[in-house]
Image (cartoon, rainbow, N blue to C red):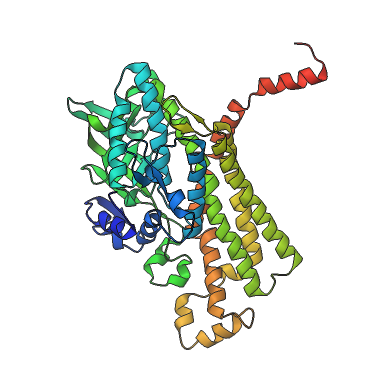
Amino acid sequence: MGISGPEEYVESLRTLKRRIYVLGERVDDPVDHPMIRPSINAMAETYRRGDEPEAEELLFAVSHLTGKRISRFTHIHQSTEDLVKKVLMQRLLGRRTATCFQRCVGMDGFNALYSVAYECDQEHGTEYHQRFREYLRYVQEENLVVDGAMTDVKGDRGLRPAEQADPDLFVRVVEKRSDGIVVRGAKAHQTGALNSHEILVMPTTAMREEEADYAVSFAVPSDTQGLVFVLGRQPSDTRKLEGSPLDVGNPRYGSQEALVIFDDVFVPWERVFMCGEYDQSGKVVERFAAYHRQSYGGCKVGVGDVLVGAAQLVATYNGVERASHVREKITEMIHLNETLFSCGIACSAMGKPTPSGCYLVDVLLANVCKQNVTRYPFEISRLLQDIAGGLVVTMPSQKDLENPEIAPYLEKYLKGRADVPTMDRLRILKFIENMTMGCGAAAYLTESIHGAGSPQAQRIMILRLAGLQEKVSYAKRLAGIDG
């Protein structure tokens, strides 16, 4: 099954020769770069069997293409059971890492394109579905990480793709050749792009006839000529360069986003899955968004589990774990987190098959799930900060604690309960700082707002799919109103 474990995955990244820039400098060895390695460690957990008894069933599936055991991240959902297991898998990995493990966007892109390519072939007589099946078989056999690239840089948000002053602000086809196409543009906020073997591109919105060149979907290896990666900044990210694990908060795991630039990249026809079929582009966007909004009912809940644990732990270290108001706040954190999980499970259990056989979540409930995710993690984080106390943002650094002149003072005056080592108390406080306002907040909070579309995008879908007129008929019937 291709890459068989986390160590083999990490080594596979070393073979990729890519143009990567970090803080203005080109980086030839991204695998060991301190600002990148924590995100690689998080991605590597998707390859680790682990100790959880349910891990084998959740992390792996049986391919409907080959009948072989594969990573669930490369699987096409064949039932509502598959949809539920996806959410359970994401919760498990969120607990392991307390961050974004970055492999979900590719999985959600696979399932969106699989069904849309099938329907596009039925409508237009194309051959995209078979091409995509062959590509997916390759990804499954090699057990590759695929970055799902949907979000264009978009330029002037008040203008359509074809209306932009610069036509390259949405990824587009600039040349069609006998052997393939040439594309130009950029994709923003690309989660895990630096840790991926492949880049799978999808259109970012429903295109019109005059925007046919923007209705394009394809896949290229991440070391393809013409690809350029620029690492995005995160709060407090240069702490990773200081060699002070305490100050990082979650030193082993992290996430990363990148701007991915397509500078006249050539794509052979066998890796093109949409090219000009503008009437199909909106389906890709809607289905991908539904799958990815479902995903947040798993991954963010797993992180939430860790934050609930952090709240209980810091309350204990502070000596207030029995205080009624602290118990009430922790209860509310649990309530909010399980509500998110309930939404993720509900939209999965209510899923239905598409004509391709791939199962799609209930789109309305998936949007409800993500709408709640735009709110509840912020309240969970607020409650956690409330319980932790002000020391979260006023602690000295690890270097202060290592200075023999002042370390005894810090050991004495930063202690909580007498039976709890001072350093243990500071470790959990630094972890809380990271998760609620540092690098961890980028994956837990900001991503909760804008990942899988802005809050307004979900509200538009909720109103569109709610069946308002049907609900009006219920009220009129019961109120005795004719018509």
Q: Splitting the image into 4 quarters, where does residue 122 fall?
A: top left
Please provide percent x and percent y for residue 103: 40, 48
Residue nearest the viewer, comparing 337 with 75: 75
Please provide percent x and percent y for residue 80: 51, 36
Q: In the drawing, does residue 37 fall left or right of residue 476?
A: left
Q: Is residue 457 visible?
A: yes
Q: Disc count in the image? A: 0
Q: Splitting the image into 4 quarters, where does residue 220 fall?
A: top left
Q: Residue at x 33, y 52 (%)?
A: 195
Q: Residue furthest left?
A: 178
Q: Residue at x 57, y 74 (%)?
A: 425
**Above or below — where is 448 with respect to 312?**
above
Residue nearest the viewer, comparing 466 with 26: 466
Q: Residue at x 49, y 57 (%)?
A: 53
Please provide percent x and percent y for residue 288: 45, 35
Quarter of the picture containing the C terminus is: top right
Q: Residue furthest top?
A: 483
Q: Is residue 445 visible?
A: no
Q: Residue at x 56, y 41 (%)?
A: 370
Q: Residue furthest front?
A: 67
**Above or below — where is 101 with respect to 453?**
below
Please provide percent x and percent y for residue 183: 26, 33
Residue nearest the viewer, comparing 273 with 244: 273
